[in-house]
Each structure stands twice: as structure tokens, then as C-alpha cells.
Image (tube, helix red, strand yellow):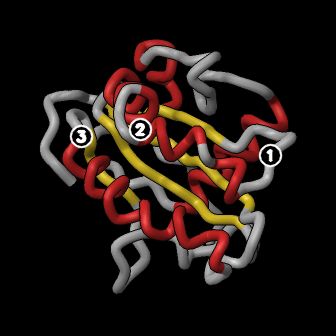
Amino acid sequence: MTASPHAAHLAQLNVATLRHPFDDPRMTPFVELLDPVNAAADGAPGFVWRLVEEGSDDATGLRPAGEDVIVNLTVWETQEALWDFAYRSGHLDVMRRRREWFERHVEAHLVLWWIPAGHRPTVAEALERLTELRALGPSPRAFTFASSYTTAEAAPHLQPTPTAP
């Protein structure tokens, strides 16, 4: 995790339901884009951290939301930094092709929330925030780009979500 002058960072989780098994040849273009996209994220201004599977360069082998669902969990210094990476970089080209590889989600598939700087969110915490967004709608605890909250609005909720043992 890189050092940051910000008191709070933005955590981001998105989930994607695979159209095909990960080793299916139709998924090859996506798989081939993983390393360059992850390297671009790692070097992007405002990037702090991303979830990776132990012994791997990415988190695609982790399946905490179901066997056909991959997760992407990252932390950014600011919402603007995440937005710039997601929508103003080469990452946008990959997102434009997502229907080739992933099913369309009816429910929210992306959740954002503020965390104390230095906190590394767990997958359980992230999935809990997504569940909360789906059940209750946007709030300072779980929101989207379209319904965002400031760190000041989220201040009472900056503690990590306790998870069951």
C-alpha cells in the first residue's frame, strides 16, 4: 500500500458474472488484457492497493461471490483518481467490451465506500457493502459514482465493517 496524505481513501468493489468458463477460448482476450490493465492501475495516479490472490498477479481465481463471479477490489486516494482510471484511460476500452465476457447485472455490481487511510478492506467487508447497497440503496456507507457521498458525509461510517468470525 502506498503512503498517502489523505485521511480517507475510496474502496471499490465490482463483481462480474462470467459468460463462459475462465479457460474457454472466448475469454482469452479478457485474460490477455488482465496484466496490462492491472499494471496500468498499479501505476495510475491515486492508486493505493488492489486485491490479488496469493501466488497470483490478480484476483480472478478468488470466487467469494460464486463460481461464475469474479471480483475486483481496489483502493484509491480519491474518487476522482478512480474515475480517471476507469473512464479516462485505456481501461475504458476494456469496459466497452465487457458484454463479450460478462453477463449484464440486474442488481448493482459496483459499490464504493470511504475507508480510513491505511485500512485494507476484506472481501467479506466489500461484499457486505454491496449487499447493503442492493438492499437499501445508496448511502454514505455504500454508494455509486452516480450517487456519491463525500468523506465528510461518510465520516461517521469510516470504521471498517465488522465481519462475522
Q: Residue at x 44, y 68 (%)?
A: 32
Determine whether label 3 and label 2 are within 8 Å by CB.
Answer: no
- Of mark 2 and mark 1, the one earlier in the sequence is 1
Q: Quadrant of residue 144?
A: top right
Residue that mark 2 sits on: 115
- Of mark 3 and mark 2, the one earlier in the sequence is 3
Q: Which mark is residue 92?
A: none
Residue that mark 3 sits on: 44
Residue that mark 1 sits on: 104
Helix, strand or loop for disc 2: strand
- Residue 138 picture location, percent across and down: 70, 24
**The N terminus sits in image quarter:** bottom left
**The C terminus sits in image quarter:** bottom right
Q: Is residue 10 left or right of residue 2?
A: right
- Residue 80 picture location, percent across and down: 36, 21
Give the distance between the C-alpha atoms of the residues marked 3 and 1, in whole angstroms: 27 Å
